[in-house]
Image (cartoon, helix red, strand yellow):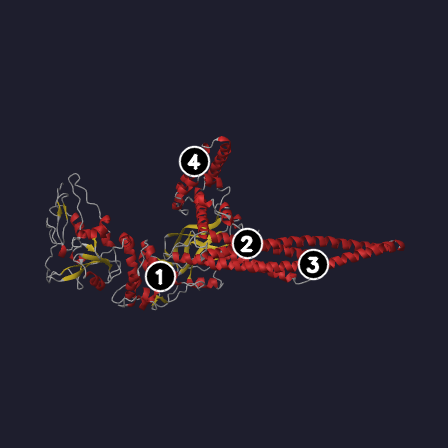
Amino acid sequence: MAVWIQAQQLQGEALHQMQSLYGQHFPIEVRHYLSQWIESQTWDSIDLENPQEEFRAKRLLESLVQELQKKAEHQVGEDGFLLKIKLGHYANQLKSTYDRCPLELVRCIKHILYTEQRLVREANDSSSPGGGLLDSMSQKHLQINQTFEELRMMTQDTENDLRKLQHNQEYFIIQYQESLRIQAQLSSLSTLPPADRLLREPALQTKRATVEAWLTREANTLQKYRLDLAEKHQKTLQLLHKQQTIILDDELIQWKRRQQLAGNGGPPEGGLDVVQSWCEKLAETNWQNRQQIRRAEHLRQQLPIPGPIEELLTDLNKQITDIISALVTSTFIIEKQPPQVLKTQTKFAATVRLLVGGKLNVHMNPPQVKATIISEQQAKGLLKKENTRNDSSGEILNNNCVMEYHQATGTLSAHFRNMSLKRIKRSDRRGAESVTEEKFTILFESQFSVGGNELMFQVKTLSLPVVVIVHGSQDNNATATVLWDNAFAEPGRVPFTVPDKVLWPQLCEALNMKFKAEVQSTRGLSEENLVFLAQKAFSSSSINPEEYRSLTMTWSQFNRESLPGRNFTFWQWFDGVMELTKKHLKPHWNDGAILGFVNKQQAQDMLMSKPNGTFLLRFSDSEIGGITIAWVAENPNKVGERMVWNLMPYTTKDFSIRSLADRISDLNHLLFLYPDRPKDEVFSKYYTPPLSKAVDGYVKPQIKQVVPEFATASSDSASGNQYMDQASSPSVSHTHTYGLYPPSADSIMDGDGDFDLDDTMDVARHVEELLRRPMESQWIGHTQS
């Protein structure tokens, strides 16, 4: 069902929120009459941070205006006449508003659609079967909204009390002035004759006594009103502080944690619209209470009455100022983090946002934000409020940006689009720490005033840890540092401490998250895969996952110490697997065609119970970023005996020449993918289509892979193409038998029984060499010079 149809069925607060999305910037009538067109456009495909997308945004604006004009032209009748005028007016208004900034129109509509979808989803969740039970998150959000309603009523109550106090105080002052007038009259009696004085004095004395008695009672009443109002403000501030703590220390911190995990491939952190709406309500309620407390203080100064109220108001004013200060400084956040592996001399971007900027009118005098790179030690000093104002650990180009207000979405943000780290100053490293373990952070800072310069704020926020590299070869190890930090950082830590060791299940969760994100697959690491990784990490042969649950892995084991008998670390091996799978094996991994995490002995045990020609794909133990084919076939040295063969691992270099599917297609002795799937059923959809016929007398050469021990040379008479095996000269055969070459003295297998295609001659490279020679008898087909 269309979102707009469902949105029209919203009720209560949800309907109010939906209606508040619209205004002069985007009239609700446009949404109504063009709902189908609006929802059919690809707004999400436009990157708002990319100025080059402005052309597409402009086209969308023009289309929107045309659709409105078309809709207007089709209106007939008396009612249609008015609608025709209105829609035509809206078309001109939108064109005028967004013609110079079409990306703002896209931002506005994306915000509207996202919020509508959220409201509809929340409404559906709350009315779903099961007694309308809300999940814990919805219950928490409901509680937050209920508290805001309570705060609104409390603030309205104190506003009414304040007005009543002001009215009573004004009347008190009038009566006080009357008392002074009576006193003046009594003083003037001394100038009158005694008879006149005796005649008028008693009445004035009585009147003065009555007024003074009233003033005494009313002064006590005013004092009580003031104390009662202060007490109510105290309760409001307590609830306000509690609500703000929930939003800033729970909701916003959780969003930041999700943002951090997203850096490891976790789900997107989600939008900030809900949190911003809460923060804006906090800002509004805070400011209203601050103004009330200031007005109460003004009333006290107008009419000082001895008592504790002066101290109470001073304390309340300090409390509300502290609450506002905490809100402003905590809502200055990094919406889009800079890359956590940062290469020098490379352009990068980041976005900083002030969640309460619009509500506090900070945009009326847009502040400037400055970005600086600082070290871990400098970050620690900053949090301790040490004087580190002029300290930096490098130079960032284009590091100043003015915050911009987007009226359609109500966001105030600074978009750093073209920053570049020109140079970096490294600190002395500790012990075995390498440069790819050194952490920096980007410090964003700004200053501005709110309330007509009533309050001045200096705000600062730190990015997630950044590892600076100068060469692409450092990326692998830098990513390990970032992965460990993002996964295991604890809330409120001292920058940027992380545990030196973690439980194996915790690391598994991080690795699985990273693997799925890098490979862009819903197929993550199975329990069997994780057992294999545990065996590799702990040099163990146990296949029982329970034995690894209580084990811990240190950072050194993860990416400092090489695996036994290897010259690479656990992480370097795992990262190599991810890179290979991401670049060349993703469809096969998603299809379940790659077992991958299987060692050589396991592969042998699995294959020996299967028919000849059964094969599987596993990641190489001995080479970073390698995958090998293991298959079962006859032992050429002993008739009637079978053995498992392992091909030397393929790497990215090999797959850039010929794909895995085509290589498997080339090897006719591979028949069934383990356990029993015909290989063509699994891989044929990925085979490269056959080459075309000869053109102008030329034929295209074809690269094919063979394993000499299992080669069955063949030719395709229709195409005139044939492939070469790895013999010293090509031979042609029209048979399709699976013959075995007798073992030669110069064995093509290594000590482990692996075929070494590099040593025996990689066919692809050999063909490339042949193609550089004059074409003679190497290729069957017609030649023409």
Say which residue label 3 marks. Answer: 221
Q: CA distance from mark 1 to mark 2?
A: 40 Å
Q: Secondary structure at mark 4?
A: helix
Label 3 SS: helix
In depth, the one of 631 and 654 nearer the eye is: 631
> First in sequence: mark 3 or mark 2?
2
- Element type at mark 1: helix
For label 4, the residue is 66
Query: Amino acid under label 1?
Result: Glu
Residue 472 horizontal/vertical position (percent): 32, 56
Mark 2 to mark 4 CA distance (whole Å): 43 Å
Label 3 is placed on what type of residue?
Answer: Thr
Mark 3 or mark 4, which has the lower sequence index?
Answer: 4
- Residue under the image location 58 percent in, 58 percent down: 236
Q: Position of residue 714 (x, y in %)?
A: 12, 49
Q: How would you rate the neighbour count of disc 4 (Cα within 10 Å): few for under 14, some for 14-19, many for 20 or more? A: some
Say few, some or many: other residues with alpha carbon within 10 Å of mark 2 (under 14 / 14 to 19 / 20 or more): few
- Of the 4 image quadrants, the one containing the C terminus is top left
- Of tags 3 and 2, which is closer to the observer? 2
In the displayed structure, does residue 185 sit left or right of residue 379?
Answer: right
Q: Is label 3 or label 4 in front?
A: 3
Q: Earlier in the sequence, mark 1 or mark 3?
A: 3
* Separation of marks 4 and 1 at Cα, in angstroms: 51 Å
Q: Earlier in the sequence, mark 1 or mark 2?
A: 2
Residue tagged 1 = 509
Please name the residue that numbered disc 2 is placed on. 149
